[in-house]
Amino acid sequence: MPRKLKSDIKSRQVPRDKESQMEFVEPQVYLIAESKINFDQLKAMLASVGEETATSWFARTKEASKSEGELLTEVAGRICYKSFGVGLNPNVTKIRESSRDYIDNTLSKGDGSIFEHATCTFAFLNVSRVLTHELVRHRVGVAISQESLRYVRPTHLRFWLPPDLQEKKTEVKSIVEQIEQNYHALERSYGWDKLNFDAKKRITSALRRVMPEGMATSIVWSANHRTIRHVIAMRTTESAEIEIRFVFDKVARMMKERFPLIYNDFEFTELEERRERGDQSTTRFERRGWDFHPWRDAPALPPRDLNPHDREVTGCQVG
């Protein structure tokens, strides 16, 4: 009998320098979309609701507004009490004139429903499936679309290195490179040029099971501001997983800059211990006045605004 080759798979392997393209990457955060207002329709609506009183309020507020998302939030809140000006509602004899005062008052009471009208859409790139598994646990007021390894066949592995593995970078690189080489060797054992798309999909789906959970992926995440506030509060605490802390630290900074009124009550807290350890995310975001810290007082009840499920949504705010 003829001598068998060691492996038909091995015989098709390419040289190591061409085989391994593994690279270390850093998670990236992009704010790619946000709620926009149809101003013609909004002005017509306000004229119908409150005539010159409401349209005058709109002219003043629009000029001072920092974002359409915050303006939409305020309009939604004020329509509950017709508080665009004195005289529209006989029960209202005084209103908060500025947007800052209005939204600050809503935040201080823990009301959250008006913050569900405006949304933001983020693209999180080079994040691991460790992060996406945690992110999808936040289901209220969100939409999610993730890169599918059922359809996408990876050409090489990208990997974010957590701080606790920095001293083991060489060993990690070697392990991930070996996984990548073995994956491509297995991948090449199929005649892809002869397969239809349905067969490619089935085999691609099967092959993904040998890939590491830490491999980089992409996910688009849309959420309303009430949910974004909640996730920032939960995922930037000291006890949160380090990668999602790193990502939502970036999200929080974006939101503070882009929507200064809605996120006005969030403050940075520096974490000296993490900085000394070399962690990339060294800040925690928490609301002013919160006594509740999940990592320290687990049995305590959160404030009303912390979780959309924790209380009834009333839908109306004071003027």
Image (spheres, rainbow, N blue to C red):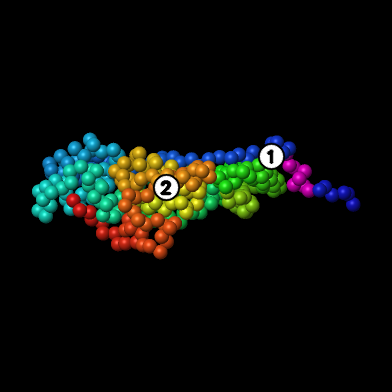
Q: Residue at x 29, y 41 (%)?
A: 68
The mark lying in front, picked from 2 and 1, is 2
Q: Is residue 196 left or right of residue 261?
A: right
Crowding at dot 1, Cα within 10 Å, few <14 / some 14-19 / many 20+, comes out as some
Q: Residue 39 at x, y = what percent?
A: 25, 39
- Residue linked to disc 2: 284
Question: In whole angstroms, how far apart are the C-alphas of marks 2 and 1?
Answer: 41 Å
Front-most of 152 and 220? Answer: 220
Q: From the viewer's perspective, tell me whether residue 130 is left or right of residue 72.
A: right
Looking at the rendered structure, the secondary structure element under dot 1 is helix
2 and 1 marks in contact (CB < 8 Å): no
Q: Amino acid at mark 2?
A: Arg
Can residue 95 be seen here? yes
Q: In the drawing, what numbered circle is on residue 254? A: none
| Res. 51 image quadrant | top left
Question: Which amino acid type is marked by label 1?
Answer: Glu
Q: In percent of the image, x 42 and y 47: which residue is there?
A: 284
Residue 139 quadrant: bottom left
**What residue is at 26 percent from the left and 47 percent from the top?**
104
The boundaries of the magenta stretch are 7-14
Q: Residue at x 54, y 47 (%)?
A: 128
Image side of residue 2 versus residue 174, left or right = right
Residue 94, position as x, y percentages in the image: 13, 49
Is residue 271 in the magenta section?
A: no
Which residue is the site of mark 1? 19
- Ranked by sequence position, the earlier of labels 2 and 1 is 1
Q: Nearer the viewer, residue 144 or 292?
A: 292
Q: Residues within 10 Å of mark 2 (few under 14, many from 20)?
A: many
Residue 214 percent across, percent down from the top left: 57, 49
Residue 319, image x, y percentages = 18, 51
User: Relative to 40, is 141 above or below?
Assistant: below
What element does badge 2 sit on?
strand
